[in-house]
Image (cartoon, helix red, strand yellow):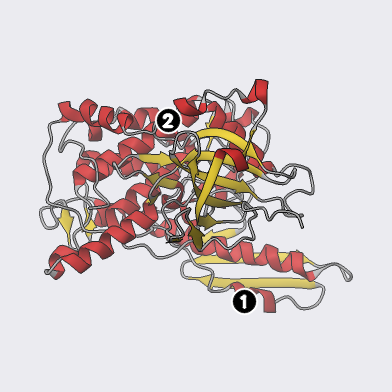
């Protein structure tokens, strides 16, 4: 009888028996695979500590020094010696997470005893119809070409006994930002006696530190001519030192300048709540500005402890039931947005594709309505190129000049910098948020310019957030 492969993805991952017979339970310490969207409740922040801006370099140096060294993995040259076998190199400890494209394990290096995260690439029939899974190939290629303390590193690739067992060895992080916000909030609730303390948001110094680290990572990606195309809180990992690391580069793509010389790319990228307005209107020629919109959404999420643009798909089911006959006319009123869709359905065509098309349109309308409520509507003055977008004529809406962004995030004499369960920004912080969430992508701030913004030079200094004590 052949020996059972202990690295098979269908093995039980909930319990692992150590050499001494002790059973180790499964703990979700890292979320590198695709995470599902859920409601998030970030944790209360400790008392605000003012740190001089001059100490910023010291803080960043401390974060850099906390990064795990990969020197022990460089003793093996994969180009000359081939990939190592996972069976003789790593001991599997526990199952961490699983997504559409991979399974993540916690493991120990047998040579150094370092704890790492190992992502096993899925080889499902749907993913491999064109050969090696393209998302995995893209992620491997991008991560091996990037090296930054705020980007999750890939130490090496290892293989199993069959061609469909391919693994990425990465740094093991405690959890993702979305989970860290929730667990810190729950921990504080259990330990705190005051309901007012339980509702405290992140300190401004902590938010500034986290945003600076995220922008450093995004700037490094863009400087190497890549777009991430899926920046969100569940794709930002947290080390126990407070260091952030951007992960999940399966949707990353190269770009060139000027943008209109890029090859047309799909607009169905980025998780919906973090997707920029131009992508929702079908833009296929775009660049790194879509990542800055997502970073702005993360910025707002750190302030109010929840996604700031949570569209929903309540009309999806009704859209499917409306398809009857060969010619369909659909009119839906979604608050201030009216959608007019005319679809010709051939007599013998599949209704599934048509249903999917209609659901996507309605789903997007919910998201667009949220954006227009917060940021106002596009005009010839603030976005002259808007009318040329592929879906600009599909959606009709009432013009809205006023915005709610300042009301929700700008500090006033009434709310100061924190109030209840939300944090507020000073003038510099609000200006940065506003420039990230600019409707016109040509006017959106770049990651490099954002790092040089006065928000990081004035006001409170940066303080590394403490999620785990």
Classify residue 262 as left or right of residue 347.
Answer: left
Residue occupied by mark 1: 317
Q: Reading the chain from its start, which is encountered first: label 1 or label 2?
A: 2
Q: Residue at x 16, y 30 (%)?
A: 53
Q: Residue at x 62, y 60 (%)?
A: 11
- 3D distance between C-alphas at marks 1 and 2: 41 Å
State whether residue 306 is above or below residue 215.
Answer: below
Q: Nearer the viewer, residue 363 or 179?
A: 179
Residue 446, visible in the rendered structure: no
Residue 258, visible in the rendered structure: yes
Q: Position of residue 4 (x, y in %)?
A: 68, 56
Q: Position of residue 170 (x, y in %)?
A: 50, 39
* Label 1 close to label 2 by CB (< 8 Å): no
How busy is the neighbourhood of tag 1: few (under 14 within 10 Å), some, or many (20 plus)?
few
Quadrant of residue 421 in the image?
A: bottom left
Quadrant of residue 323 in the image?
A: bottom right
* SS at mark 2 in the image: helix
- Residue extending furthest top? 80
Quadrant of residue 49 in the image?
A: top left
Q: Nearer the viewer, residue 113 or 166?
A: 113
* SS at mark 1 in the image: helix
Q: Which mark is residue 219?
A: 2
Q: Residue at x 68, y 75 (%)?
A: 320
């Amino acid at each position: 009888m052949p020996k059972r492969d202990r690295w098979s993805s269908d093995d039980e991952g909930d319990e692992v028996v150590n050499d001494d017979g002790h059973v180790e339970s499964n703990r979700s310490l890292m979320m590198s695979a695709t995470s599902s969207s859920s409601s998030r409740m970030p944790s209360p922040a400790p008392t605000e500590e003012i740190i001089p801006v001059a100490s910023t370099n010291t803080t960043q140096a401390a974060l850099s020094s906390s990064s795990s060294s990969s020197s022990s993995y460089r003793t093996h040259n994969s180009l000359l010696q081939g990939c190592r076998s996972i069976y003789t190199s790593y001991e599997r400890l526990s199952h961490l997470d699983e997504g559409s494209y991979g399974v993540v394990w916690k493991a120990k290096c047998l040579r150094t005893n370092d704890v790492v995260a190992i992502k096993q690439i899925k080889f499902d029939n749907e993913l491999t119809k064109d050969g090696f899974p393209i998302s995995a190939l893209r992620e491997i290629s991008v991560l091996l070409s990037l090296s930054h303390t705020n980007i999750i590193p890939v130490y090496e690739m290892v293989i199993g006994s069959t061609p469909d067992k391919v693994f990425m060895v990465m740094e093991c992080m405690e959890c993702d930002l979305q989970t860290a916000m929730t667990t810190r909030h729950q921990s504080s609730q259990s330990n705190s006696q005051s309901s007012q303390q339980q509702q405290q948001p992140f300190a401004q110094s902590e938010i500034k530190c986290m945003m600076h680290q995220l922008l450093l990572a995004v700037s490094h990606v863009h400087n190497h001519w890549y777009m991430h195309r899926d920046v969100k809180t569940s794709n930002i990992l947290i080390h126990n030192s407070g260091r952030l690391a951007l992960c999940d580069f399966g949707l990353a793509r190269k770009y060139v300048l000027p943008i209109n010389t890029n090859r047309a790319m799909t607009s169905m990228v980025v998780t919906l709540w973090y997707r920029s307005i131009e992508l929702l209107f079908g833009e296929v020629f775009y660049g790194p500005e879509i990542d800055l919109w997502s970073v702005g959404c993360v910025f707002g999420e750190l302030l109010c402890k929840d996604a700031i643009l949570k569209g929903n798909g309540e009309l999806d089911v009704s859209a499917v039931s409306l398809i009857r006959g060969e010619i369909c006319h659909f009119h839906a009123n979604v608050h201030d947005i009216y959608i007019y869709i005319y679809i010709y359905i051939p007599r013998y065509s599949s209704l599934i594709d048509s249903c999917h098309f209609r659901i996507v349109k309605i789903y997007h309308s919910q998201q667009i309505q949220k954006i227009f409520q917060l940021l106002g509507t596009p005009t010839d003055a603030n976005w002259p190129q808007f009318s040329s977008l592929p879906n600009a004529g599909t959606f009709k809406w009432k013009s809205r000049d006023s915005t709610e962004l300042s009301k929700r995030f700008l500090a006033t004499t009434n709310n100061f910098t924190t109030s209840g369960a939300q944090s507020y920004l000073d003038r510099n912080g609000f200006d940065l948020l506003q420039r990230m969430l600019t409707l016109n992508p040509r006017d959106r701030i770049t990651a490099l310019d954002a790092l040089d913004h006065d928000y990081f030079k004035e006001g409170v200094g940066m303080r590394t957030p403490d999620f785990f004590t």
